Amino acid sequence: MIMKKFLVLSIASSWLGLMGFFAGPAEIVISKVEGNCTIAKAEQYPKLAQVGYTVDPKDVLSTYHQGTMDVTMKDSAGWRILPRSACKIVRYDTHDLKLELTKGNAIFNVKTLQWNRTFTVETPTAVAAVRGTQFWGRVDTDEIKTVRTTFAVREGEVAITVKATGETRTLEKGDAIDIPYDETGKAVTLREATTDEMNAMAQASEIPV
């Protein structure tokens, strides 16, 4: 009888483990909206963003003058899209979330991820890979030939890969990097984050995850 109970418990535990393993990713939802912000579903006209909206792959999130929007992936990450900015959910599954920051600014608050999960942010000139950190990404897009990406880190580490050269630089607390559009593949160097950048990143702690 004891053996039968043990067998039943073992099977139940295994089943629950498999359910967890094959479970889909947590929903990504809009958790806060201030001012004029929109969400555009694939091939659809943008509509005003509202708290509680689910964000799916290929969705484009945009903010306008004085508009900000918080987006939350429960128990994993959150990010705040600052005014006059746009980002797109490129890929999203059980183990991988990839965003594309196409213009403007976003502040990120990412919890320490499990070994088999990834969180990446791509811009026109760089890709940031994150394990668990608070950081800031900015894309200046006045003209395509002068596109510049800036990343700065408040907590943790962020690995930045420069598209033009393929080199990867690791940013730690207080580090920043500016990556211009550069077809010649000129090397980039780290710098110290400015006081304004560090102060701006303090709001990462307000972003729910």
Image (cartoon, grey):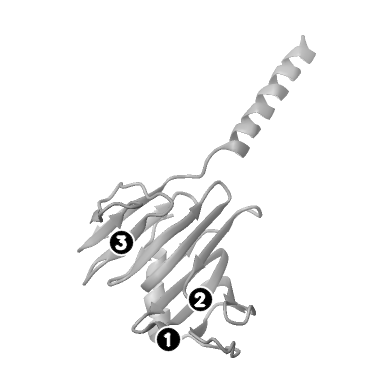
Q: Amino acid at mark 1?
A: Lys
Tell me the kind of residue under disc 3.
Met
Mark 1 → mark 2, Cα distance in angstroms: 26 Å
Cα–Cα span, label 3 and label 1: 29 Å
Query: Is the residue 63 above or below the residue 22 in the image?
Result: below
Residue pushed farthest right? 3
Image position, residue 95 (x, y; %): 58, 50
Q: Tell me which numbered mark, 3 or 1, is placed earlier along the sequence.
A: 3
Q: Amino acid at mark 2?
A: Val
Write the residue at 27% across / 50% down: 51
Q: Secondary structure at mark 2?
A: strand
Vertical side of 17 occupied by 56: above or below: below
C-alpha gap between disc 2 and disc 3: 20 Å
Give the x, y percent position of residue 71: 37, 56
Q: Name the residue located 72 percent from the left edge and 24 percent from the top edge.
A: 10
Q: Residues within 10 Å of mark 3 (few under 14, many from 20)?
A: many
Q: Which residue corresponds to mark 3?
A: 69
Q: Position of residue 203 (x, y in %)?
A: 37, 69
Q: Is residue 137 visible?
A: yes
The one of 163 and 197 positioned closer to us in this rendering: 163
**Quadrant into which the C terminus falls:** bottom left
Rendering coords of residue 60 (x, y %)? 35, 59
In the picture shown, does residue 78 fall above or below 15? Answer: below
The residue identified by callout 1 is 145
**Vertically, is 58 above or below 184?**
above
Nearer to us of marks 1 and 2 is 1
**Circle 2 sits on which residue?**
153
The kind of secondary structure element at disc 1 is: helix
Q: Within 10 Å of the Cα at label 1, are there few (<14), some (14-19), or many (20+) other Cα atoms?
A: few
Q: Earlier in the sequence, mark 2 or mark 3?
A: 3
